[in-house]
């Protein structure tokens, strides 16, 4: 398997042509270092590359927290969800770069806000274990994710395995 994003799934009914001469306002949710890790470094690199593009204005909501227990990590995600209520109306595109937990906790909320404010949403998922983790989650959670965040306009997966697992959706 390759270490680069190999496929994206688009929902063409939600793609909008940009006729606005102003820079695109991107709202990115993701994990920044520290600690140092592959996904965090890739997200930081993406942010840095977008920040120098004149056609783009970035706002980053870091999901990184210095949380040692699960309750504190979930609280950190809920806090990001509250901030999202105020920032999504002011952006043009919402971009989510979640861990598995962040996708389960924050994903449906970000999706709902994106729909409410008519903002296209993209999700970039790294890590080949997501299909297995998704299959082990309770039925109500899989149902919720299928009805919400898995219907985002654009999904980018790191591996062919993930592309194949989620292609039917």
Image: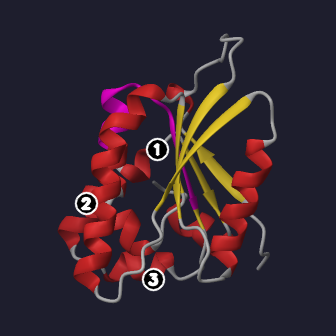
Between discs 2 and 3, the one toward the N terminus: 3
Q: Nearer the viewer, residue 166 or 36?
A: 36
Real-space Cα separation, disc 1 to disc 2, in angstroms: 15 Å
Q: Which residue is mark 3?
A: 132
Q: Residue 14: x percent and y percent?
A: 50, 28
Relative to residue 11, is residue 24 depicted above or below?
above
Disc 3 element:
helix
Q: Residue 32: x percent and y percent?
A: 59, 68
Q: Residue at x 45, y 82 (%)?
A: 132
Q: Is residue 159 shown to the viewer in this render?
A: no
Disc 1 residue crowd, few under 14, some 14–19, many 20+, Cα 10 Å: many
Tell me the mark number nearer the camera, choosing from 1 and 2. 1
Relative to residue 66, is residue 83 depicted above or below?
above
Real-space Cα separation, disc 1 to disc 3, in angstroms: 20 Å
Q: Nearer the viewer, residue 86 or 133?
A: 86
Report the number of numbered marks: 3
Disc 2 element:
helix
Q: Where on the picture, by quarter, is residue 125?
A: bottom right
Q: Which residue is mark 2?
A: 143
Disc 1 element:
loop
Q: Which residue is mark 1?
A: 152
Left or right of residue 92: residue 105: left
Between discs 1 and 3, the one toward the N terminus: 3
């Amino acid at each position: 398997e390759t270490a680069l994003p190999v496929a994206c799934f688009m929902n063409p009914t939600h793609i909008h042509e940009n006729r606005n001469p102003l820079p695109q306002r991107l709202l990115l949710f993701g994990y920044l270092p520290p600690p140092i890790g592959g996904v965090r470094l890739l997200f930081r690199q993406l942010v840095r590359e977008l920040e120098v593009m004149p056609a783009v204005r970035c706002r980053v909501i870091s999901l990184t927290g210095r949380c040692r227990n699960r309750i504190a990590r979930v609280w950190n995600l809920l806090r990001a969800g509250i901030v999202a209520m105020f920032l999504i109306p002011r952006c043009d595109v919402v971009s989510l770069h979640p861990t598995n937990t962040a996708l389960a906790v924050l994903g449906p909320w970000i999706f709902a806000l994106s729909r409410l404010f008519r903002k296209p949403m993209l999700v970039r998922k790294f890590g080949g274990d997501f299909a297995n983790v998704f299959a082990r989650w309770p039925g109500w959670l899989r149902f919720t994710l299928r009805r919400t965040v898995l219907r985002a306009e654009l999904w980018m997966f790191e591996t062919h395995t993930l592309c194949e697992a989620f292609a039917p959706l």
